[in-house]
Amino acid sequence: MLNLGLFSGTKSMKSVKVSFRLPYLTHWGQSLLVCGSEPVLGSWSVKKGLLLSPVHQDGKRRKLLLPEGIQDGEVVEFHDLWQTGSDDLPFRSAFQNVIFNRSWNLNIERPLGTIQNKLEEDTVLIQFKICCPNIEQDTSVYVIGSHIKLGQWKFQDGLKLSYAGNSIWQGDCVLRKGDLSIKYPFWYSKNDKAGNFSLETGTNRELNVGSSENQPRYIFLSDGMYRELPWRGAGIAIPMFSVRSESDLGVGEFLDLKLLVDWAVDSGFHLVQLLPINDTSVHGMWWDSYPYSSLSVFALHPLYLKVQALSESIPDDIKQEIQEAKQRLDGKDVDYEATMATKLSIAKKFLPRRKI
């Protein structure tokens, strides 16, 4: 199912003909429909959505903005792509806030839903839109192609796109009506003296518009993600109990992850993967150490608790108990039962001192 929220931001109701095109290979018995906020699209009811018809050509909710200036009766065509589950990975918090985290921000040059050029008679406006989440500072994005308005494959004459926010670049050009058949890829270049550039991978994208009487005046292309080699990054996989430090109490502890992350960054790693860290203390025996038999999907295992961090003012007798336990449990192997019993015993002594 393709979910579309239609035409926000318009000041008055306009009667335009909108067609949706979605390249997707269905199997026998499958159908595609468009479900959206407008009554004609079912008002978000899947059962009342607009059923698409197959034309035999080679998930997420979207928001389409109908630009100002489109006249009543105009034919508007949207070209979209079916997104797979991996397409939104670059927008997950782990990638946006950590792996692709940037100390710089791009200024929005032209918001989504705006067009730059004006139409004349017998012309068609085509808007290109591409998503580039992993882009470096001071980089420009272009589209080149077979048409003269796209530079006729000359990089220096390509159509420069404007940043529209949310890692999306867009740009439009006006072409003469007729049998439009365009091949094009996207590319980006660094705005420096070296002039380094990168052309997206894969075959050229195509736009084919026949010379029918009902040819659209506006074509909005959503070309999905910029095609480049898949992101690859090295990382480290380690069980929590092995994240040992000089201050731990017989086992790796949650606060020791800070030291691990600092080491990973200094070593050039991008990822840290842990075995499950949920509470498995069902029987109080050593076989509870198996990390895949958790009793809760929310509770963290008390084994990895750093008891020294439970209070800013630890009494001397508890400090002495912690120090003695540290010397007793600081072995090559983790003594699961002894470590669990010691940590729970010490932790319970802090409860009367805490205000709940």
Image: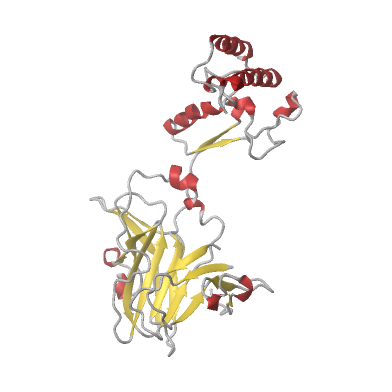
Residue at image point 44% right, 35% down: 268
Front-lying residue, 64 or 179: 64
Residue 333 image position (x, y, % from top left): 65, 19
Q: How is the image coloured?
A: secondary structure
Q: Quadrant for residue 237, please give it.
A: top right
Residue 57 image position (x, y, % from top left): 54, 76
The answer to whether residue 125 of the structure is visible from this angle is yes
Number of numbered discs:
0
The answer to whether residue 230 of the structure is visible from this angle is no
On the picture, is 18 further left or further right than 171? right
On the picture, is 285 further left or further right than 13? right
* Residue positioned most to the front: 355
- Please identify the quadrant where the N terminus is shown: bottom right
Q: Quadrant for residue 302, please give it.
A: top right
Residue at image point 57% right, 11% down: 323
Front-lying residue, 28 or 119: 119
Residue at image point 52% right, 64% down: 61
* Residue positioned most to the left: 193
Q: Quadrant for residue 279, please give it.
A: top right
On the picture, is 223 further left or further right than 50? left
* Residue positioned most to the bottom: 213
- Please identify the quadrant where the C terminus is shown: top right
Front-lying residue, 96 or 267: 96
Residue 106 image position (x, y, % from top left): 32, 53
Residue 182 image position (x, y, % from top left): 39, 75
Residue 102 versus residue 85 in the image, above or below: above
Residue 257 versus residue 161 in the image, above or below: above
